[in-house]
Amino acid sequence: MENKVRYELEFPLNSSPQLLYQYISTPSGLSEWFADNVNSRGEFFTFIWNDNEEKARLASKKTGEKVKFRWVEDDGKDGEYFFELRILVDEITKDVSLMVVDFAEENEVAESTQLWENQISDLKHVIGSV
């Protein structure tokens, strides 16, 4: 399996950072736009899409600013890859955007980017940012 490459995407959102943080940091918020269902036990989150389950550990968070989930391997150990959702606020304009940091195989970055664009579109609908 080839190594994955890191990529970053930034999405402008019409939302308060406090509201947005609820949608990126809680199982109920994430299940409204990111996955079909999200469950958590302590720092471990289970993301469910159709019949597929992926586990991740909440590796770090800064309230109101960012969350970082590290994918967990089948053996229960932390994997090499993670995804991070970071809320950015322009100091001058107060515009809010969501920075996504993720990894994909080099030939799948465009496909992964499209997937994030679709998910962020869902998020915009949920928070009324369209």
Image (tube, rainbow, N blue to C red):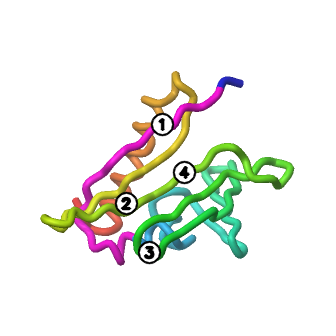
Q: Identify the mark at residue 46; answer none if there is no mark.
A: none
Judging by the rendered image, the residue that carries numbered circle 2 is 123
Query: Which residue has dot 4 on it?
Result: 83
Tag 3 or tag 1, which sits nearer the N-term? Answer: 3
Q: Nearer the viewer, mark 4 or mark 3?
A: 4
Which tag, 1 or 4, sits closer to the chain's start? 4
Q: x, y percentage for residue 107?
A: 52, 22
Is 17 magenta? The answer is yes
Residue numbers of the magenta segment: 3-20
Mark 2: give few (<14), some (14-19) or many (20+) Cα within 10 Å: many
Q: Amino acid at mark 4?
A: Phe
At label 3, the amino acid type is Gln
- Residue bearing the label numbered 3: 22
> How far apart are the two marked residues, 2 and 1, measured between alpha carbons?
16 Å
Query: Which residue is label 1 attached to?
Result: 112
Element carrying mark 2: helix
Q: Residues within 10 Å of mark 3 (few under 14, many from 20)?
A: some
109 relative to 59, above or below: above
Calculate the distance from the C-alpha at mark 4 to the C-alpha at mark 2: 17 Å
- Quarter of the image where one finds residue 19: bottom left
